[in-house]
Amino acid sequence: MLSRELQVLFFVAMLDTVSSGFLFHHGLAVEANPLLRVYSTAGTLPFVFMKLFTFVPGVFVLEGLRRRSPVFITSLVRVAIAAYLICYLAGTAVQFKL
C-alpha cells in the first residue's frame, strides 16, 4: 500500500496527465517539457503512456525506499508534491495567460 504522501503525489501526477491529455487533444495547450512534447503531438494515447512511464515507476521505487528511510523519503515526497503543484500551476498560468 502506498503511503498517504505517495498517494497524493500519484493523484497530482494523474491530474496533470489527464488534464494535459485533454487540453492537447482539443488544441488548447502545448506541452512545455521538450522530451514529452513529441508524444503530445503524436496523440493522446502516446502522450498518456509516456507520461505514466515517467512517474509510475518512480512512485513505486520511492515506496520501497520509504520503508528503509521513512523520515527522509516522506519529507522528500512532500517537497516533490509542493514543487509539482507550483510548476503545474505556474505552467497553467503561463499557458492561459492568467
Image (cartoon, rainbow, N blue to C red):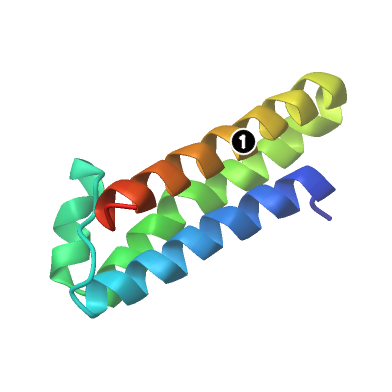
- Residue 17: quadrant of the picture: bottom left
Determine the residue positioned at 24% across, 54% down.
Answer: 31
The image shows residue 11 at horizontal and vertical percentages of 64, 59
Q: Secondary structure at mark 1?
A: helix
CA neighbours of label 1 inside 10 A, class few (<14), some (14 to 19), many (20+): few
Mark 1 = which residue? 82
* Residue 2 shown left or right of residue 57 in the figure: right
Amino acid at pointer 1: Ala
Pick the residue in front: 65 or 89.
89
Q: Residue furthest bottom?
A: 26
* Residue 50 shown left or right of residue 85 in the figure: left
Pick the residue in front: 85 or 97.
97
Pick the residue in front: 22 or 92.
92
* Residue 8 shown left or right of residue 70 in the figure: left
Determine the residue positioned at 66% across, 46% down.
Answer: 60
The image shows residue 38 at horizontal and vertical percentages of 14, 56
Residue 3 visible to the viewer: no
Residue 83 visible to the viewer: yes
The image shows residue 50 at horizontal and vertical percentages of 34, 58
Q: Quick check: 79 above or below 33?
A: above
Q: Quick check: 65 above or below 20?
A: above
- Residue 23: quadrant of the picture: bottom left
Determine the residue positioned at 50% across, 48% down.
Answer: 55
* Residue 77 shown left or right of residue 86 in the figure: right
Total number of numbered labels? Answer: 1
Position of the N terminus, as image quadrant, is: bottom right
The image shows residue 78 at horizontal and vertical percentages of 71, 33
